[in-house]
Amino acid sequence: MKKTALFLAISASVFLVACGDKEDATNVPDNAPVEGSNTTNNNVDNTTSNADAAFNFTHFDLDVTYANNKSYEVSYENETTGAEVKIEDDINNKKETGNQAVDTLAPIFGSFTFDATTANDDVINEVLQKFNLANDYKEFELEIKFPDGTEKEYKKVQ
């Protein structure tokens, strides 16, 4: 009985790991910062500096809510174990995950000019502009984790 239970537990674990998560992405740019990696030493030993990195963050979690309960959500997490990426666009009835979402987000993320010291309103305005989102939102929420470990939250209710 114990052998059967152990076999089933191991089989289930292997199955779950093999299936993967549909939000997993494999086409994140090689020089995108990864949480827990050394990307802040200004190329002292040939590692990537923040200025040279594809994106200026390791986590990007956006939720913009509009009237009529429509929202635009982006979730991007790049960790040493892999990247999870998702876009849920209720406005245009679209959902993208994994590599498809990375393909959509990479040019947008790469065009951002803000960093951890940029004023909150400037970050909010730039994110809305780069994602082509309307300014008539009810609530804007953004959480970003920068490669140096700094976590910032940008929140605005109208």
Image (tube, helix red, strand yellow):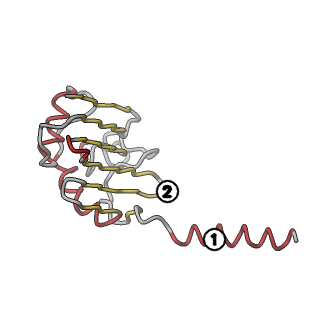
Residue at the limit of the structure toward the right, as seen here:
1
The residue that appears at 28% across and 43% down in the rendered structure is 56
Percent x, y of residue 60? 32, 44
Q: Of discs 1 and 2, which sits in the foreground?
A: 1
Q: In this rendering, does residue 41 appear at all?
A: yes
Mark-to-mark CA distance, 1 and 2: 17 Å
Secondary structure of the residue carrying numbered label 1: helix
139 vs 130: above or below? above
Q: In this rendering, does residue 46 appear at all?
A: no
| Badge 2 amino acid | Thr
The N terminus lies in quadrant = bottom right
The residue tagged 1 is 14
The residue that appears at 31% across and 40% down in the rendered structure is 42
Percent x, y of residue 89? 25, 55
Instruction: Judge by depth and name the residue closer to the eye, 135 or 98.
Output: 135
Dot 1 and dot 2 residues touching (CB under 8 Å): no
Residue at the limit of the structure toward the front, as seen here:
68
For residue 30, which quarter of the picture?
bottom left
Q: Find residue 81 and name its label.
A: 2
Percent x, y of residue 118? 21, 29
Q: Is residue 1 left or right of residue 69?
A: right
Secondary structure of the residue carrying numbered label 2: loop
Question: Does label 1 or label 2 sit earlier along the sequence?
Answer: 1
